[in-house]
Image: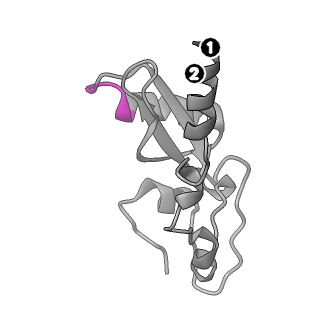
Amino acid sequence: MSNDSLDPRVNRLKLGVAGEAIRVEEGENWNIYEVFHQEKRGAHHEHVGCVHAPNQELALIFAKEQFARRKKCVNLWVVKSADILAFDVEDEDMFANNADKNYRDASGFKVMEKINKYKQSKK
């Protein structure tokens, strides 16, 4: 039973009979790279999609062809998807913050008295 797929990534693996061991040759196992695009200097890089490539150099070339041909672009980043780390959903309480931020206000400090006293001493 062969796998007649239209997807070249599937055909590249040369899948054979079900249950038979599959041997992947060097360069056949392409990685997924996330692509980040910068529209103008100083702007943030934004995620625009992903590409499949055997190495990071080709990923950059594929990203340029896919995401920088038609749209204005000054820079691209490619990052292997497997290298991106994220917190688990269960860890969302780590991002809880204190909504009451009165420690940022200067209202608790008695500086006006000192300022007025200083002004009076300079007269």
Horizontal placement of 41 versus 82: left or right?
A: left
Q: How crowded is mark 2: few (under 14 residues within 10 Å), some or many (20 or more)?
A: few
Residue bearing mark 1:
122
What is the C-alpha distance between the residues marked 2 and 1?
Answer: 5 Å
**Residue 63 bears which disc, if any?**
none
Q: Which amino acid does label 2 sit on?
A: Lys
Q: Nearer the viewer, residue 50 or 86?
A: 86
Residue in the picture at 54% in, 34% down: 77
| Most common SS among magenta residues | loop
Question: What secondary structure is marked by label 2?
Answer: helix
Magenta stretch, residue numbers: 66-71
Query: Residues at badges 2 and 1 in contact (C-beta under 8 Å)?
Result: yes
- Describe the colour scheme in one phrase: one colour
Q: Where is residue 16 in the image (x, y as percent from the top left)?
A: 58, 74
**Image coordinates for residue 87, horizontal then vertical, percent:** 64, 69
Question: Residue 24, relative to residue 34: is it above or below?
Answer: below
Residue 77 visible to an observer of this rendering:
yes
Give neighbour class at mark 1: few <14, some 14-19, many 20+ (Cα, 10 Å). few
Q: Tell me if residue 32 can be seen.
A: no
Q: Mark 2 points at which residue?
A: 119
Q: In which quarter of the image is residue 72?
A: top left
Q: Which of 51 and 121 is in front in this view?
A: 121
- Asked if residue 37 lies in the magenta stretch, the reply is no
